[in-house]
Amino acid sequence: MGSSRDQVLNTPPSLIVALTTGFEVIANHISLILFPIVLDFVLWWGPRLNLERLVYVFLEDLRFLVASGMVEAADLMQMDQEVWFELARRVNLLAALRAIPIGVPSMMAGRLPIETPWGDPSYLEISSLVSVVVLWAVLFLLGLWIGALYFGLVAMVSVDGKFDWQQITQAWPRWGMQSVLLTAILLIFLLAVTLPASFTIGLMGLLSIQIGQLAFLLFGGVLVWLLFPLLLSPHGIFLYGRNALASIRDSLGVTRFTSLRTMLFFLVVFVLWQGLNRVWNIPDETSMWTIVGIAGHAFISTSLLAASFVYYKQSYDWMQSALSRLTKPNSIKE
């Protein structure tokens, strides 16, 4: 008769168990939702790092080039300039703190509000393109490091049920470095796939708009198929201390071994997250009810992240158990 631990390892990952455990863990460690709540309040109430002046200078330069005949009138000039100014006014470089793929979730990073219940916030104009690039890079890296701490804390309570602050202090620098490395690897992979495809789709679009649209749809499906095995890439870093490459390899192995279950898990997570996001975004940005939406979004997002760590551990242990049985066939008879 096998031990209880062997029985756990032989149990396939359960979507229901992962979700319920994730919500219970965050309910018992509710302080973790402060990460997304604080970020949302910074993006809602904090100063805006604004690009309106930079867009104005760009449009003025473009108008001069068109008037001088150096370039032909483009679609950019045919559009209502108010649309561009409204977009520029809403863009807030602080949203780069919501780093992807390892970052603190944020509802306001998607809304980019320009009003609060207490009136308009302060604006800090960024008029230099170099400043925009440098600020975005610094904020994005800072977001990755904060996100690494957030992911690490959620992973720890998801598995151990408690915080080990000594371990956190020692692991955070490594989490941050591996998060940056993982992000760089995924970005290089994405560029290597999308740049040649974009060029090819563009050529097809010149031949026929319908062919270009069909190629775009096909490429979208291929891209989803390529990115799906990488969705669990960060988890090995925070659960097992893997480096970025080893964590990617583990993600590929887990998703291949549990492909249908993992696909169903992420489908349910996406439906829950996206469906509830519509609820949280119902209040206007000038309404105090938005605070409820921010809190609800923070709890759901953190709980779903915890559920993903629980699911990953179940899947990884089940995969390792199955591989162990395959390499040691005699152990089945014991």
Image (cartoon, helix red, strand yellow):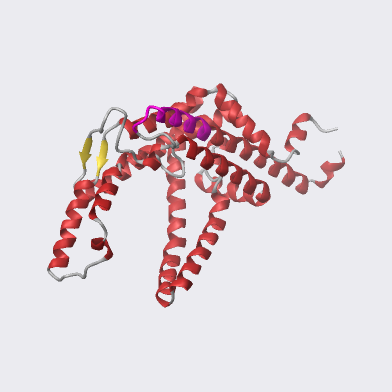
Is 72 positioned to the left or the right of 117 in the image? left
Q: Is residue 164 visible?
A: no
Furthest toward the left, the residue is: 68
Residue closest to the eye, 69 or 189: 69
Magenta-colored segment: predominant secondary structure? helix
Residue placed most toward the observer, 301 or 25:
301
Chain part drawn in magenta: 286-302
Extreme-right residue of the structure: 333
Q: Quadrant of the N terminus?
A: top right
Q: Position of residue 36 (x, y in %)?
A: 43, 32
Can residue 81 be seen here? The reply is: yes
* Farthest residue, direction bottom: 207
Where is 85 relative to 272, above or below?
below
User: In terms of depth relative to the viewer, which is nearer, 309 or 241?
Assistant: 309
**Residue at the image point whose x is 47% and y is 67% from the top:** 213
Q: In this image, 145 relative to 80: left or right?
A: right
Q: Quadrant of the C terminus?
A: top right
Q: Residue at x 18, y 61 (%)?
A: 62
- The image position of residue 237, as x and y in percent, is 53, 39
Q: Quadrant of residue 59?
A: bottom left
Q: Is residue 99 magenta?
A: no
> Image quadrant of residue 331?
top right
Q: Is residue 146 left or right of residue 15?
A: left
Instruction: Give the residue drawn at x 28%, y 64%.
Output: 75
